[in-house]
Image (cartoon, rainbow, N blue to C red):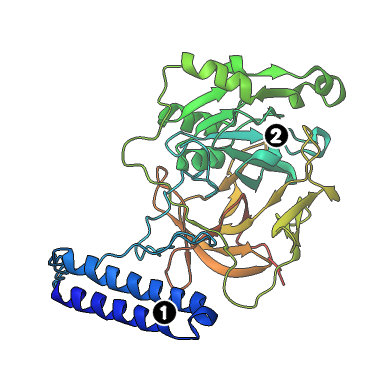
Amino acid sequence: MEFIRNVTGHIKRIVMAIAKNKYFRRFAPLGAVAVIALVSLVMCMSGQENEPYVEPDPLPVISSTEPVTTTPPVQESEPVPPAVIDDPDPDPEPDLPVNPLTGIPTEEDISRHRPFAVMINNIKKANPQLGISKADIIYEILVEGGITRMLAIFQDVSDVGVIGSVRSSRLYYVDIAQSYDAFYVFAGGSPGAYNALSNRDITKFDGVAGPRSEIFYRDSHRRSTMGYEHSLCTTGERIMERMPNYDIRKEHEEGYVRALSFAEDGTPEGNAPAVDFSVKFGGSSKTTSFKYNKEDHLYYVSQYDKDYRDGNDDIQVAVTNILILRTSISGIPGDNAGRLDVKTTGQNTGYFICGGKYIEIDWSRDDLTSQFIYSLKDGSELILGQGKTYICIVSNSVDVILG
């Protein structure tokens, strides 16, 4: 306060001196401004001195061991996509059920179901056959008279439609049906076939003598144009409608494993081509031709000098795999009808054709209840291509030319 009083006294004396000066009037406005500014300064200093001193708050101490959190300013920017983390051990794709006769995935697991093996008439007059293009496996073998007959094997007949015409059985067809643990569908048979059917554990559907003949019917058009013996048919629908009523085993027994193995591409190694060839079943007898289509990797089948077509939908029979199996074929001694004895057990050689190429193979079958086993010449398992298969069983004496 003493300081203020001293300053104020000095200001008064300065003002009085200026007032007595002859230039006062001339510079009075400027002097007034200066005096006012000086007085304001003095008053400001006086006010600050009168306010008590307050100790400022200390700054916060941040430990070097604790993270410092700051809030960044909000900015508009492009959204950042979530990080993609590669799973080093991704879950494997689930194994889909497959048709055990083709290796092709199915919507439902039908692998435990017993298949159907149907005797199909192949005399020229009885063509076209019905339902044949939907067979998973087709066997063609000689019968008496230089003609052949087919055994069409279906893992599932529910959507096949009409099947036929159904013809009589022979002993070696019984053997093959048994190797698949199949329901055997036929219409009559040779004495040797009936003898085997009576003494083996085979589920029979016989259109002539029964049992289960109610699945069959005579097609009126075929009966009038082809003859009574070429008119017997069935349908997948008729079979499946009646199956629940039959007290028969409908699935393979526990532990049953199908011997066939498949890969997406079954083309054999090597450079032996097989793209357009025919199989003669002996002498002047029936010939079947195969032509490879590299676009869809299928072999299209022809017989009787024209495409082998299904009478249901006019689809040409086409397959992924062809097996030509050699075996002993001879006439049955004392059989006046000229029926044949075809050996289906033991071991022998053959050919596997797939993807435009062929390779020599071996086949074996231990006994009548066993499946056919196919192997390469080095003893390793033969792997078929996923798809349908056509199997020709021919005599050891038949020349097979594939190249």
Label 2, secondary structure: give it.
Answer: loop
Q: Position of residue 391 (x, y in %)?
A: 61, 52
Q: Which residue is mark 1?
A: 19
> Position of 273 compared to 12: left or right?
right
The answer to whether residue 296 is left or right of residue 31 is right
Mark 1 secondary-structure assignment? helix
At a point 46% along the width and 27% down the height, the residue shown is 203
- Front residue (pair 232, 195): 232
Q: Is residue 283 above or below residue 19?
A: above
Q: Quadrant of the N terminus?
A: bottom left
Amino acid carrying mark 2 in the image? Gly
Direction from residue 254 to residue 65 in the image, left or right:
left
Q: Nearer the viewer, residue 216 or 400?
A: 216
Q: Mark 2 — residue? A: 131
Quadrant in the picture for the C terminus? bottom right
Q: Which mark is first along the chain, 2 or 1?
A: 1
Determine the residue positioned at 50% across, 50% down.
344
Based on the displayed image, in which of its 4 quarters is residue 379 positioned?
bottom left
**The one of 281 and 1 positioned closer to us in this rendering:** 1
The residue positioned 13% from the left and 72% from the top of the image is: 63
Q: What x and y, as percent, mark residue 372? A: 47, 52
